[in-house]
Structure formats: structure tokens, C-alpha cells
Image (cartoon, rainbow, N blue to C red):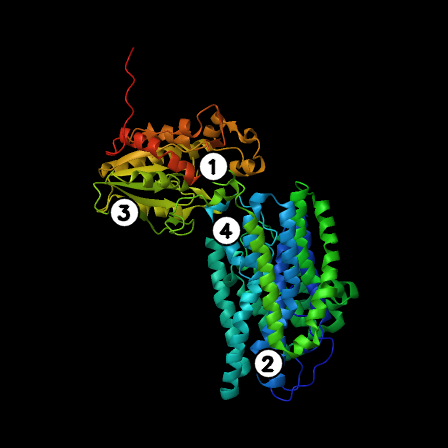
Amino acid sequence: MTDEVAGPRHRASKPTTKGLSGTADRPHGGSRFRADVEGLRAIAVGLVLIYHAGLSELSGGFVGVDVFFVISGFLITSLLLAEFDRRGTVSLVEFYARRAKRLLPAACIVLVVTAIGARLVLPEYRWDVTGGDIVAAAFYFVNWRLADRSVDYLAEDVAPSPVQHFWSLAVEEQFYIVWPVLLVVVALLARRFGHGRRLLTIGLIGIAVSSFWYSLSETDANPARAFFVTPTRMWELAVGGLVAVAVGVLPRIPRLVALVLGWGGLVAVVAAGFVVEETMPWPGWRAALPVLGTAAVIAAGPAVGRAGPAVVLGTKPMCWIGGLSYSLYLWHWPLLVLADEHYDGISTKQGLVVVAISAVPAWITHKLVENPVRHSRVLSARPKLALGVGLNVTVAAAVGGLALAAVVGGTGGNLRPNPVRAERDVPDLYAKGCQQNQVSAEVVTCEYGPADATTTIAVFGDSKIAQWVPALQALLPRNDLRVVTYTKSACAPADVDTNGNEGLYTSCREWVGNVLTELTGPAKPDFVLTSQRIPTAAGPTPEARRTTMRDGLDSTWARLEAAGIRVVVLADTPSPPFTVWQCVAENRSDWSTCEFERDPAVANSAAPLLREAVAGPQSDPAFIDLTADICPAPICPPVIGDVLVYRQGSHLTATFVKELAPVLGVALKSAGVPLPAVQLPTPTPAP
């Protein structure tokens, strides 16, 4: 994918010193062309492209990326070792200059074209996020942006990015910031103390073991994030590096063993594409199948020759595809995303056609940009110039992303907030890091108002109660009120087991227990204001899940009341059947298209469950239902006055919540919260 070619097509001069591989006068794997490795890249890119096209039979085609990681680790390490054998050192400037020539010009073209395509094809509400993704891709940190988004409870409406595939390129480049530096350190130590091969092997094993251990734990705890982050993938590149270090002994592998290794490895790689399911947590231990399979094919090559997988992988068509793999990988995904948006969805056959068509710009880029820049004698002779070219094209790509994002804004008219910015209209507790994620059970809080206020309200629950914090902030002045938030994403505030995206949501129940301990301890508040989005607990049947949640809430509230805390339950907000802000953004001239029925929206929320739980036998909380203020008619409007009601899913915009502050204040005062600045409505006299 992003690795160098599978070795130059000519033999390098023999080294005259003993290299880090521990062999004298023997060319490294990077010193001559490996047709089998080039063909292996064709297998890898084929798996990815066909999987992305939507072929259901190839459910694990994404393992092609794991294959690329191993190949890249092998080839880059081989080239670095070969350089050390020739020079006795490694030039970091020249290494990064080669990477810049190899990767950045082609990537820049794809990113700029993608920015233009996004402006022409994608709806306006996607320009902002896509522009930011392009900037992140240009500077090779988009994997971390995607990792954060994958666990962001408030990013559930974000569509696949047209540069999402750059995550794997980012992982490689982050690895290659560290690896050559480590190699230089090892080389210096080897020149002084010897044992270069042993030191290098120990270093790679250390990287592989620590990364693999982290991959196991993170994939188990947080699989969505584990897929993208660099530490869970470094072991895969390190495995390739270990094969490169062992290149001196690989030709001595018994031929029969090499045959089994080579063919068995190829079968493992191909089989992984079919037997791995996209729902499996990844990478973790399951990634060992394609990783070790790839390593086996590469390791067996020198001993088995043309009797091994090279008889297939080394054919001209396979080598042609392998040589084109980087450009193919760059182009296919943006074209798929843009085609899917333009045609409002594409079939698998159409996806395969798009993938096939992507070979055209890939070939043009490969011939007119990738190869000419990579083989430029001027740039090869002047590494600093090559780095300058790389920096300039990177900035150009980033400018394309910034320009796309900058187009958004000023198009909302009098509507507050601009619908294309609606997802950013959130309570400030998110920016302050006061809402706990779905992984940790640690209690984190935000505090608003004076510390010595007469009345303290604890906000306890998930994002559906967190959304009301802006209204509470508006009530702070003149009310001698202090607000402390205890919120966690997608976590119902009940001491029961609940289900998450990856099975039992164990950190939720643990967090609830920790919060209850704190709330009923010395720092207990006067009131707890609570709500939630989740209407069911874990259980064998729908009715059992609902009953468990209802009874669990009743019991939890009773525990708070027993500690002398008044519980106020706020009904969940109506749940629209579609993304309201997107609809408004696409139908600015006729918002009636974005109206929806109130009764089904209420039924699809947790409001009915909360109302049942309030009537439970153990507790006696106050109940507030502001549905009539959020949806004042049987048909819910998307905009009230000049304010957009919803920002994401069934969450309200912070702007709209602030508008409801007086209404919430009246309801809280009626529930017994002492709010002297809030005036209750004057009762209408009886006729």
C-alpha cells in the first residue's frame, strides 16, 4: 500500500561490512525485486477493494490492510538494513525524503480531488466534517480522529468519510516516525558494542509483544477505537520487520518446510478474507491469521523459489496490480463514497464497477505523478528539496480541506443554530471533558454556580439529562443554586445490567454504583435531576428487559430518597424518526417536510418507561414532562420561532434548551426546588 516497491529491480552492490542482519556479503530482501511480495500486495488490495464494493461473501476483506502492514514492515526494514550495510549508518533525512516522494504527491492529488468532489456531490452538512477529515488525512493523523469519532456518542449521525481509508496510511507513517530512529540508535550501539542483530531483534520483539498485548486488551474493551489506533497495529509492522532481520537465514529453511509455510500462509491470507466477519472485534488475536500468513509467505520465498506461491504471485498481472496498489487504494474509496451519495445508494455490482473504474485515475496518477516523482534524479540527489516538495503538497491538500470546511457558514439565515453546525450546538460540559465515555467507570463532574450555594442539584444520567445543563446554567443567577453533573454516554442511571454496542455494558453499572456512593456520601446534593434514553435493561425477553429497568430505577431512586435527597425525573424528549437537522439543511425553503408525529416519537423514547417507574412502589420522585413545550402540537415542528429544535438523534440543541430555561425553572419550582427568581404562573380564577 504505502510501502516501497518490493525491492529495486537491480542488484545493489555487495556490502563490504557485516550488517545488522548478522550476515556478511549477502544482499538483504530489499536489495532485489521480490515478485512474490509484489503479487502479495495485489492480493491485499484486491481483498480491500472487493470488500469495500460490498461483496458479502468477502466479509473479511478488510484484512488486506493487515497484509499491507506486514509487507510494509518487511520492505522498509529491509531497505533500511541494506542502507546500513552499505554505509554503516542510516540517514533519517534521506529516509523521510524517500517517503515524501513515494507517498505525498499522489496523496495530495487524491485529497484535493476529493475535496472538489465533496463540494459538488456531498450535501452541505457534510462539508465541515469532510473538510476536517481531509486536513487530518493530509497530516496523517486521521486515524486518531476516526478513533475518537467511533466512540463519540454524539457522532452517531456522521456518515462514512470519503478519506476514511487514509487511517491505515496514517498508522504506517506514525510507525515510521519511530522505527528508523530506533534503528539508528541500535546501529550506533552495534558499532560500539556489537550484537547489532540481537539488539534489533530484541527491539522489534519488544514492540511486537507490547503492541500485541495492548491490542488484545483494547480490542476487548473498546473494539471500535482499537480498529484505528496506532498502538494496536504496530505489532503487525514489527512482524514484517522481524522477517527482514531474519533474511540471512531464510534461504536455509528446509525446502519442504518452506513449501508448507509459503502455501499455507497464502491460504491463510485468502481464507481470512472469507472466514473473518466484519462484526468480529478487530484486530486483537484474530488478526494473527492474516499477519502470520503474510509473514510465512514472505519468509518462505527465498527457500522455495518458483515452487512456492511465487508461481502465482509472481505473474505479470499480479505484479502489475501490486505495483499499482498504492494508487488503487488511494482512489477507490473516495469514488465509492461519492458515487453512493450521488446515486442515493449503489448495489454491489455498481460498487464493483466503481472499483474497476478507479483503476483509470490510479494508473494515470501512478504513471504521471507517483513514478516520475519517486524516480526523479534531482529529488533523489537533494533530499531536503524532496522534503520541501512533500511539505508543500501536504499543505496544498490541507488547504483543500480547509476550503471545503470554510464554505459552510453564513447560510443558515436567521435560523439558530445553522443546521449544518447543529451537532456542535452542545452543552459546554463536553468541551470540559465532564461526560464520561463508554469505557471508563470513573466519576467525572462539572460544577456550575457558587460552591457555598444554599441549594445543590446533581444532574445524573446519560446525554439526555446532560442536554438540559444549558437551561440550568441560565437559572443560576439570582437563584443561589449550584449544579453538579454526573453523566456518562448511553448509560441509564439505574443499578442494573444494560447492553452496549459490544455486549454487556459493564462499565455503566460500575459507574452508576460509584456515582450512587458519592451522591449518598458526605457530598450529597439536595436534589437529583435525572433522565435517560435507554428504556430497557439486559434480560431474556423484551418484557423482562423493560420490567428490570423499571424496577431498577424505582429501587435506585428509593436509595437516593433514603439518603435524604429529593429525586426529580425529567421525561425523555420525543425521538424523531429521522435526523431533523439534516432534513432542515436540505429543505430550507420548506421545513414542513421535516415535521413528524408526536405520539410515535414519544412512544419511541424512554418517556413512557420513566412515567411507569415514577409510579413504582419503592420511591416517590417528582416527574416533569416538557413534551408539550418541545412539540406543542400533534405534529412536531423542526423549528420553533427561529430556533432549530434537534441537533443529533433525539437530542435538543443547546440553543433551544436555553430558550426553555424559564419553562424548566417553573417546573422545578413546582417540584419543590427553591428558585426565588422564578415566578410561578398566576392561577386562572374560576369563573
Q: Which residue is mark 2?
A: 21
Q: Earlier in the sequence, mark 3 or mark 2?
A: 2
- x and y percentages locating residue 561 in the rendered image: 25, 36
Work out how far the residue at label 3 is from the one at label 1, CA to CA, in angstroms: 32 Å
Q: Nearer the viewer, residue 399 or 333?
A: 399
Q: Which residue is mark 3?
A: 518
Work out how far the residue at label 2 is from the one at label 4, CA to CA, in angstroms: 42 Å
Work out how far the residue at label 4 is from the one at label 3, CA to CA, in angstroms: 30 Å
- x and y percentages locating residue 627 in the rendered image: 41, 28
Q: Residues within 10 Å of mark 1 (few under 14, many from 20)?
A: many
Residue at 74 percent of width and 61 percent of height: 364
- x and y percentages locating residue 429 in the rendered image: 37, 47
Work out how far the residue at label 1 is from the one at label 4, CA to CA, in angstroms: 20 Å
Q: Amino acid at mark 4?
A: Arg
Q: Which mark is residue 149?
A: 4
Q: Amino acid at mark 2?
A: Ser
Residue at 46 percent of width and 58 percent of height: 217
Q: Residues within 10 Å of mark 3 (few under 14, many from 20)?
A: some
Secondary structure beneath label 2: loop
- The image quadrant where one finds the C terminus is top left
Q: Which mark is residue 646?
A: 1
